[in-house]
Amino acid sequence: MVTIWLKNPLAIYTGSSTDLDARGGVVIQGTKVIELVPLGAQPSNKPDQVIDASEHVITPGLVNAHHHFYQTLTRAYPDALNKELFHWLKTLYPVWAGLDEEMMQVATELALVELMMSGCTTASDHHYLIPRGLEHAIDIQVETAQKLGIRSIFTRGSMSLGEDEGGLPPRHTIQKEDTILDDSMRLIRQYHQRGDGAMTQIALAPCSPFSVTTDLMKETARLAERENVMVHTHLCETIDEENFCLERFGLRPVDYLEETGWLNHRTWLAHGIHFNEEEIRRLGQAEVGICHCPSSNMMLASGICRNKELEAAGVKVGLGVDGSASNDGSNLVNEVRMGLYIQRLRYGSAAVTHFDALRWATSGSARAMGREDFGTLEVGKQADIAMFRLDDIRFSGAHDPLAALVLCGAHQADRVMVAGQWRVHDGMVIGVDLPALLSRHQAAAKRLVERFQQRR
């Protein structure tokens, strides 16, 4: 196996809880980190390749814990502008109902390429909208991710509670529960990899309390426990959702989680904004994970996640870009900056640091999704690495390179390595014809809207 030394970085964030000196760089062999080199030292054994990292800030690969790739097709959609969550969803559900396999593939590829260019090495996607003809949406996503070489956790989403039964989605966007559970089992058997270094995993993800039945939530929890896979859903994103749970179930959202068998270490939640003190304590005791989605929460005016209280209680807090129609981007390093600033707005500028934001985007997201084998640069961990140059105008005059990465608004990684393999070089994803991808994607977005207009 080839040994690579990323030598003498401009700055390095390892994310390790131990204060080891890694200023001399990182040594990779095969798929793993095998050594951290102190400043001025040499690796224990002579490496096969030496890469001068003196102009790079090195971090663990960024980890995206919540996204909706298909929404790249409806960015800045006019009819959905300036609306809050429920009204925004009701506007877009009928548009999204026209998704087909070609649209799904190109939306997935574009979202993954955009993430990788921003330093992301592990991407999770929550795809819950499966109209007729798109029954193999997750298969398409898995194939696309494997071709690009990015580590992925795809969640088999679902909606089963139509608006005619008191839910939010229109009936033509939902599926029968037996169909959902059977396909969930199929995907686990076909694609789910286990153990350290797994490149493709499947989790189960009923969309939200307002789009699935209680029976589906319970059956999903049972299936996940039996197959030992993670579960994921939206929870406590808005006050409207809290009111829905109280009116329909007579329970607050966390009580509903417990009632349905979801209050445990296999669960990670998207958003998690509107919890009270007692609920935060219970979530921590249950070792639940929560993905903070700052840009989406600002765009939809949903509120601010209580990251510090959640972490203090034992909750595993990660970071995600959320959908590209509520964020209008899939740039994870930009989300690190947004996460830092919105959390300072809640807690004050002295209480939240760039180290906190980097932790949420790396080990926090990994742990939230049940992974301990990546998210930090430590001996034995997966060689998932992002390298950023600070040669853009926005960094001129910066004195602390690691702080500048976040505070000055890094936008694009120069190099990205996944499991010891280079996947991004000179800012571009290897093997991807970006102009051709953009052309296909823009055509698909236009076709999706035209299809909706013809049905109206």
Image (cartoon, helix red, strand yellow):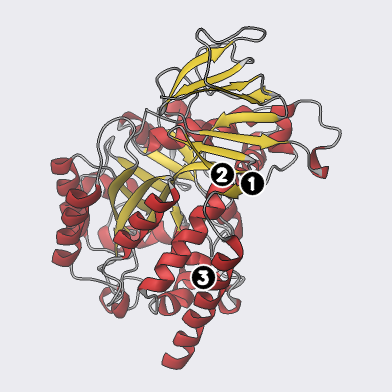
- Residues under labels 2 and 1: Cα distance? 6 Å
Residue 163 visible somewhere in the drawing: no
Question: In the picture shown, does residue 294 fall above or below 318?
Answer: below
Which percent across, then down, holds residue 441?
A: 53, 70
Residue 55 falls left or right of residue 229: right
SS of the residue at dot 2?
strand
Q: Which of 392 and 329 is in front in this view?
A: 392
Front tag of 2 and 3: 2
Disc 2 marks a residue whose amino acid type is Val
Give the residue pinned by disc 1.
427
SS of the residue at dot 3?
helix
Q: Check contact, mark 2 vs mark 1: CB within 8 A.
A: yes
Give the residue pinned by disc 3.
73
Q: How crowded is mark 3: few (under 14 residues within 10 Å), some or many (20 or more)?
A: many
Query: If the image is split into quadrants, where does the N terminus sit?
Result: top left
Q: Which of marks 2 and 3 is nearer the N terminus?
A: 3
Q: How crowded is mark 2: few (under 14 residues within 10 Å), some or many (20 or more)?
A: many
Name the residue: 71% across, 36% down. 389
Residue 54 falls left or right of residue 357: right
Residue 219 falls left or right of residue 28: left
Question: In the picture shown, does residue 279 fall above or below 17?
Answer: below
Q: Nearer the viewer, residue 389 or 158?
A: 389
Query: If the image is split into quadrants, where does the C terminus sit?
Result: bottom left
Name the residue: 14% across, 60% down. 182
Which percent across, then down, holds residue 170?
A: 34, 78
Give the residue pinned by disc 2.
424
Q: Residues within 10 Å of mark 1 (few under 14, many from 20)?
A: some
Front tag of 3 and 1: 1
Q: Which of marks 3 and 1 is nearer the N terminus?
A: 3
Q: Nearer the viewer, residue 211 or 186?
A: 186
Name the residue: 46% across, 30% down. 375
Which percent across, then down, holds residue 388?
A: 66, 36
